[in-house]
Image (tube, rainbow, N blue to C red):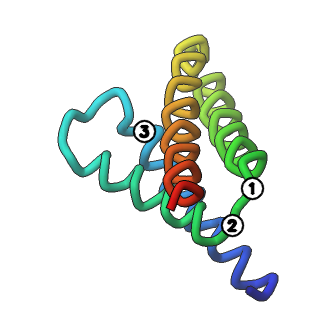
Amino acid sequence: MTRAEEQVLLQELKSDYRHILINYFTTTDKTLKHYIDKFINAVFYANIPVPQVIEIHMELIDEFSKQLKLEGRSDEALLDYRITLIDILAHLCELYRCSISQ
């Protein structure tokens, strides 16, 4: 994968992850599971390292925090979004586990 292709992929992953974060606590439909599965599969097959997934999470949380501060609101609720990261990493670990056991 060329550097340009990698950057495009990372932007797509960041966009997908932003969608997951925004909808994680507010939606109960199956589409969120679809977005999580899509994100996990893209990370897995592109061989994106876990620290880079964590970096994407932290960048987005930082952006959300800045926006909340600009609006004069507390960013304390963003701490709950650690659960999202844990969920994503658990799904990714499960995919790794299944791929090794085959």
Left or right, 63 with respect to 81, comes to right
First in sequence: mark 3 or mark 1? 3
Q: Which residue is mark 2?
A: 47
Depth-wise, is mark 3 or mark 1 nearer the camera? 1
Q: Which residue is mark 3?
A: 22
Indicate the amino acid at tag 3.
Answer: Ile
Residue 42, image x, y percentages: 53, 66
Depth-wise, is mark 2 or mark 3 nearer the camera? 2
Labels 1 and 2 touching (C-beta < 8 A) = yes
The Cα–Cα distance between marks 2 and 3, rounded to whole angstroms, is 25 Å
Residue 83, image x, y percentages: 52, 24
- Residue at 36% across, 38% down: 23
Q: Secondary structure at mark 2?
A: loop
Residue 24, image x, y percentages: 38, 34
The Cα–Cα distance between marks 3 and 1, rounded to whole angstroms, is 23 Å
**20 w.r.t. 2: above or below:** above
Left or right, 18 with respect to 3, comes to left
Q: How many marks?
A: 3
- Residue at 71% across, 41% down: 54
Indicate the amino acid at tag 1.
Answer: Pro
Q: Which residue is mark 1?
A: 49
**Foreground residue among 1 and 11:** 1
- Residue at 64% across, 34% down: 61
Residue 1, image x, y percentages: 74, 86
The Cα–Cα distance between marks 1 and 2, rounded to whole angstroms, is 6 Å
Labels 3 and 1 touching (C-beta < 8 A) = no
| Quarter where residue 76 is shown | top right
| Quarter where residue 3 is shown | bottom right
Q: Secondary structure at mark 1?
A: loop
